[in-house]
Amino acid sequence: MMDKPPAFGVARVSWAEAHAALRAIRTTVFVDEQRVPEALEWDGIDDACIQVLATAAGGDAIGTGRLLPDGHIGRMAVLEPWRGKGVGAALLRELIAAAREQGHARAELSAQTHAIGFYRRFGFEVIGEEYLEAGIPHRAMRLEL
């Protein structure tokens, strides 16, 4: 008998209504786990972005991502116990849908190099050379919409 996949949902939320949950996830993943300096993480543009929030069936916030006004996807983060369970994929699908709805010709992102394969599964292609962001190797990626 197969295990039932974990129950979670993804919704678009505003920074104003959900900033506490969004900040908690990003602080855990980026600041605590990956040692991104807080000054880099909190860039002051969250209010202008479309935010997505994944929540477990019990209501706990478990993942997030955002779409910037220029079509860049960023700040994709899933709490460790939920990685590999489809949460990141659901967040990314919602952000791509939002980019299409906003009329963007393409979605772009800055992928940590270990996550390139994940984004490739959604049709993103690597553009440009590897670079460091907050001391972490990244590659720019693009998806034509």
Image (cartoon, grey):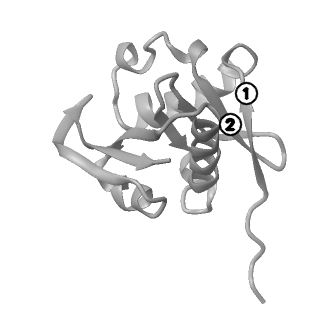
Q: Residues within 10 Å of mark 1 (few under 14, many from 20)?
A: some
Residue 96: give x, y in percent of width and height.
57, 45
Secondary structure under the numbered disc 2 in the rendered image: strand
Give the farthest residue toward the right. 58
Give the farthest residue toward the bottom. 1
Q: What is the quadrant of residue 98 in the picture?
A: top right
Q: Residues within 10 Å of mark 2 (few under 14, many from 20)?
A: many
Q: Earlier in the sequence, mark 1 or mark 2?
A: 1
The answer to whether residue 94 is left or right of residue 40 is right
Q: Residue at x 55, y 62 (%)?
A: 84
Nearer to the camera, 7 or 141? 141
Q: Residue at x 40, y 54 (%)?
A: 124
Q: Residue at x 55, y 17 (%)?
A: 46
Vertical arrangement, residue 118 with respect to residue 28, above or below: below
Q: Are marks 1 and 2 in contact (CB under 8 Å)?
A: yes
Residue 125: give x, y in percent of width and height.
33, 54
Q: Residue at x 62, y 62 (%)?
A: 85
- Tag 1 residue: 13
Q: What is the quadrant of residue 7 in the picture?
A: bottom right
Vertical arrangement, residue 139 with respect to residue 24, above or below: below
Q: Which mark is residue 53?
A: 2
Give the farthest residue toward the top. 44
Q: Amino acid at mark 1?
A: Val
The answer to whether residue 110 is left or right of residue 83 is left
Q: What is the C-alpha distance between the residues marked 1 and 2? A: 7 Å
Vertical arrangement, residue 52 with respect to residue 23, above or below: below
Residue 48: give x, y in percent of width and height.
58, 14
Residue 86: give x, y in percent of width and height.
62, 60
Q: Amino acid at mark 2?
A: Leu
Secondary structure under the numbered disc 1 in the rendered image: strand
The answer to whether residue 71 is left or right of residue 20 is left
